[in-house]
Image (spheres, rainbow, N blue to C red):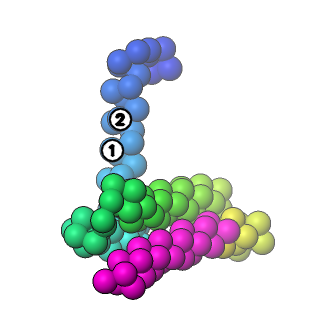
Amino acid sequence: MAGDTKGLRRLWNACGYSWAGLCAAWRYEEAFRQEITLVGALVPVAIWLARSPLELVLLLGSGLLVLIVELLNSAVEAVTDRVGLERHELSARAKDLGSAAVMLSLMLMGLVWSGVLWQRFSQD
């Protein structure tokens, strides 16, 4: 039984489910593909820009947070659509709340990057 797995087998299965989730997000979620492309393009810039390990963690972590929030938003949308495709006030609210969370994570990423850029180029 799948629920009876323990230890390393459970961990291995969890990794498989996580990989399947990432693959599904890449395949079905255009916003996730766009954000992963953005974050991927910013990784070398972050490595060049960061003057300390903390700055690098902030730059990369803010991008990773955007991806995490997008995955959660996509999960909310999938469950909402599974329940029913007809227009319902609570379904619309759930999707709007998920979208707002993504927007806030993108704003945070922008603030982090702006702060690091400001610090980097205002001291030179």
Is 93 located above or below residue 68 in the figure?
below
Which quarter of the image is occupied by the C terminus?
Answer: bottom left
In front of the other: 64 or 44: 44
In front of the other: 92 or 113: 113
Is 83 located above or below residue 32 in the figure?
above
Crowd tier of the residue under label 1, counting other residues whose Cα lies within 10 Å: few below 14, some 14–19, many 20 or above: few
The answer to whether residue 10 is seen in the rendering is: yes
Residues at circles 2 and 1 in contact by the CB criterion of under 8 Å: yes
Is 47 located above or below residue 110 in the figure?
above
The disc placed on residue 15 is: 2
The answer to whether residue 106 is seen in the rendering is: no
Q: How many marks?
A: 2
> Mark 2: which amino acid?
Cys
**Residue 6 is a magenta residue:** no
Residue at the location (42% across, 61% down)? 58
> Mark 1: which amino acid?
Trp
Tell me where the magenta segment starts and ends, as one range: 97-124
Residue at the location (39% across, 56% down)? 54
* Residue identifier under label 1: 19
Residue at the location (61% across, 67% down)? 101
SS at circle 1: helix
In front of the other: 117 or 17: 117
Which quarter of the image is occupied by the N terminus?
Answer: top left
Residue most toward the front? Answer: 123
SS at circle 2: helix
Q: Position of residue 3 (x, y in %)?
A: 50, 20
11 sits to left or right of 3: left
Q: Position of residue 17 (x, y in %)?
A: 39, 38
Q: CA distance from mark 2 to mark 1?
A: 6 Å
